[in-house]
Image (cartoon, rainbow, N blue to C red):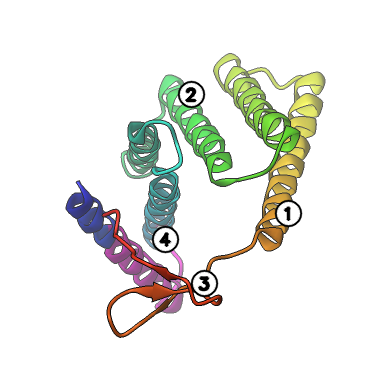
Amino acid sequence: MPLIRRYFTTGLIVLLSLVALQAIYVLITGELGWGEVKALLTALIGFAAGLNAITCLTCRHEVPKPWLAWCGIGLGILSACLLLALLWLDIHSPHYWQVTGVTLVWTLVYTHCLLPSLIKLEGWKQRVLVPLTRASSLLLGGLLSYAIVGGVYAGWLVRTSSVLCILVGFFTLLLVILHRRNKSLTPQLILTQSEDGLFMDASGRYYRVTPVE
């Protein structure tokens, strides 16, 4: 499994590099016709899918089950495929648009709900802020899905969705700020490798380090 993850990560890096080069090539060369715009959008969709996959892979050791992270990767690939089909096959079915929109929304919501697993806080901050962040993201995803499927764009829905967007951004930034502050206050163990293969901290105490993977 570690070897598979390593190959997968390497493949993602190669894919992102190719996508970036393609996007730069399309922007620099010639006029931007519809064909060039579709190629650029294809590159951006591939880049977004790769970024989503790397984000989910980063969370795989922090979630209760590793398959939760792989589900996020699968949703990202599915969303990318639906968007690419919509872009290149000229699909006019409203049901396909709805399925694509709802899948994209829940891909973003799912990944956003995974991210707080990387946050390490203390006491009530961990117990309260993390669930609030996920709850606001889930509510926003539900409202957006309702709007897409039902074709409802009432004023109350727009205002409620806007409030939830603000709350999602606020809670996310708050978690990151508190995590960074908590991390800066936590004492760090810095080890220096000695000639005999052991590791020594600043006080002169020796440690033996064994790799997990």
Disc assigned to residue 103: none
Disc assigned to residue 177: 1
Residue type indicated by callout 1: Ile
The stretch of residues the image draws in magenta is: 12-34
Discs 3, 2 touching: Cβ within 8 Å: no
Q: Kindly state the secondary structure of the residue where label 3 is placed.
A: loop
Q: Earlier in the sequence, mark 3 or mark 1?
A: 1
Residue type indicated by callout 3: Ile
Apparent side of residue 102 relative to residue 133 in the rendered image (left or right) = left
Q: x and y percent of residue 182 in the render?
A: 70, 54
Residue type indicated by callout 2: Gln
90 over 191 or under it: above or below: above
Q: Earlier in the sequence, mark 1 or mark 2?
A: 2
Per the model, the C-alpha gap separating discs 3 and 2 is 52 Å
174 over 186 or under it: above or below: above
27 over 7 or under it: above or below: below
Q: Which residue is mark 2?
A: 98
Query: Residue 73 appears in which quarter of the rendering?
Result: top left
Q: Residues within 10 Å of mark 3 (few under 14, many from 20)?
A: few
28 inside magenta stretch = yes
Query: Image point 44% across, 48% down: which residue?
Result: 52
Per the model, the C-alpha gap separating discs 4 and 1 is 34 Å
Magenta-drawn stretch, dominant element (helix, strand or loop): helix
Q: x and y percent of residue 67 in the render?
A: 33, 32
Q: Kindly state the secondary structure of the residue where label 4 is placed.
A: helix
Q: Earlier in the sequence, mark 3 or mark 2?
A: 2
Query: Image point 34% across, 64% down: which residue?
Result: 209
Q: x and y percent of residue 122 in the render?
A: 69, 41
Q: Kindly state the secondary structure of the residue where label 2 is placed.
A: helix
Disc assigned to residue 40: 4
